[in-house]
Image (cartoon, rainbow, N blue to C red):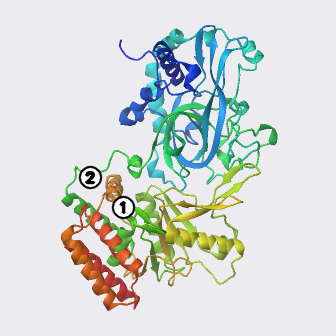
Amino acid sequence: MGGPAYDCLTNPLGAVRFSFANALSSGYDPASSVGKDWGVVDLFLPYFSDESALSQVPILDSSSIKWLQPNTLVRFRGMIQDMLGNEFYAGACKDGATWRTNKFSDVSQFPEGSPTDLQVWERRLLYCVPVPGQNQWTECSSQELRNRFLDLTGQNREKRVRVDEEMTDSMESNTSEAGINGSPFKKMKVGEATPSTSESQVPQSSGLPPATNTDSLPCLVKMYDSPESELKLNDVVEFLGVLTFDPNVMMDTDSLDEISDDLSEAESVQMPSRKVPRLHCLIHRKLETQHFLHGSSLFTETKSPQIFKEIRESLMKYLTGLLGNDHIAAQFLLLHLLSKVHGRVDNVAVGKLSLNLIHLNKESMPIFGTQLSNALKNLLPFTQSVPLTIEYLNTASFGPKKDYGINRLMPGVLQIADGTHLILDETELQPGTLNSVGVENANLLKNLLECQKVEYDFQYYKMEMASDVQMLIFSEGKSNIMPADLVLPFQPSQVNSLEVITPETAEAWRCYLATCKSLSHSIGQELQQVVENDLVAARQTDRSLGSQDLSRLLTMARMMSVSYGETTLSLEHWQMVLELERLRKERLK
């Protein structure tokens, strides 16, 4: 054999049918399997271990949807915005003595006449959206992907035609268009599938949430062979599967913001495929920051502490320049960028480190605030900015809310992915009165800042969802709305010209930040006593220090260590943290 008898990229359903036939010959029984995987996962799983093969699979987005073909293999990278429950579908039936399958398909094309031994299986529906705040550098060029795909399909076209002819089975060849339309089981579209009685079953009216931006393409992902507990709301996931949509009436991607307005009751069982493409998931994986790095991976083993130190110095020089040569602010900013929630004790999120830069105003924000915001967009995969004005707080929807009229979870500003960096600009805040919505939004923000949790409103009850969001606040004085872990007076000495950063340098910094955040950390037994003595001394010197302050110092120590690529706290790094804290308190006097 010179290779597989099917083309997984351009004919994934052929591969599914081929593996189904092999499984049948090995004793697989569709009547008792309830649709259990018969080897499809193992067939496609190598894509996630072979980056060169994975790079050939187009990414589904608002640009690529214009040229992608139905029933081809695609990837969708996004956040799970809503979980729509389960649906039943006609999974398999007998054509005479031969079993046929409809798994990973929208439309069933069973042979003429009433199918025998019809097996009704179940699949799970996930409504996914591009990750809110995802920055452009994380995305591969749509034109580049298109060229790759067309090159590959051109090379395989002759082979594919030959293989498809050989693999055309009686399910397809014996079914005429009239026959398909003649039987109630011949063409069971997803919208006609029998929904389960789950509370979160597919809505019977158009429940599309507003798009986060006009270029945002949502996707309805259909899950098979995956435990329900494996994925949860707001997970960032890469799905690889079969794309289905109606290419004749596909959406105008320039008007995606009108999605929620132009669906009629008649067409809204589920979400019409002309508006929301479907992806029948073959395999999936949760994504971390390193999966968004181009041509790089985490360098925990291949880089020495000296390399970490050199990259740290270059990044610190860049951040210091952005902050008007305020070296102390740059040090705290770096620690803040490396923070992440690595544990929870009761209601305390261990590892968070929010930062409030004060002494910024309307005049300095367009200079330093804008430069810093743009820089972070180029360094971090997901960034969002929220204007803290009375008008915005009183009108925006911060917390997700369940709409039982359409049985959908309507997103809020704070339904964001873990690892997102959130900038809160309080410099435009004017005196005014918060209405009930504004008070609720302010409380939601405060709860996210203090506990790293967001409250979801399910109308009859409310539920807190754990988050891991870095929060940076710009304000003129200490923020009363957002009591940050660290408050630092910003003291720039000059306005520097913007430094031109090469793509290679930017990629090195991104990889450095992702690597440092991923490092484990501990305090050696020898240093534990030193740290304990220093914390006791600090408490005796300043009786106002509470347990949260002492915990913050330990978090800063962890961030300081990993910023140098170290996984164990050293005396030098501990003393650096104490000195930074001393300098911060001097500024606050």
> Dot 1, how many residues are within 10 Å of its Cα: few (below 14), some (14-19), or many (20+)?
few
- Which of the two discs, 2 and 1, sits closer to the camera? 2
Quarter the C terminus occupies: bottom left
354 over 267 or under it: above or below: below
334 over 68 or under it: above or below: below
Mark linked to residue 473: none
Residue under label 2:
300
Which residue is at the far front? 32
Residue 195 location, quadrant: top right
Marker count (numbered): 2
Question: For this view, does 580 lie left or right of residue 407?
Answer: left
Label 2 is placed on what type of residue? Thr
Measuring 47% from the left and 83% from the top, which residue is drawn there? 359
Image spot of residue 364 (x, y percent):
49, 78
Image spot of residue 576 (x, y percent):
25, 76
Mark linked to residue 500: 1
- Any part of residue 320 in sight: no
Residue 560 location, quadrant: bottom left
Identify the element where label 1 is drawn. Answer: loop
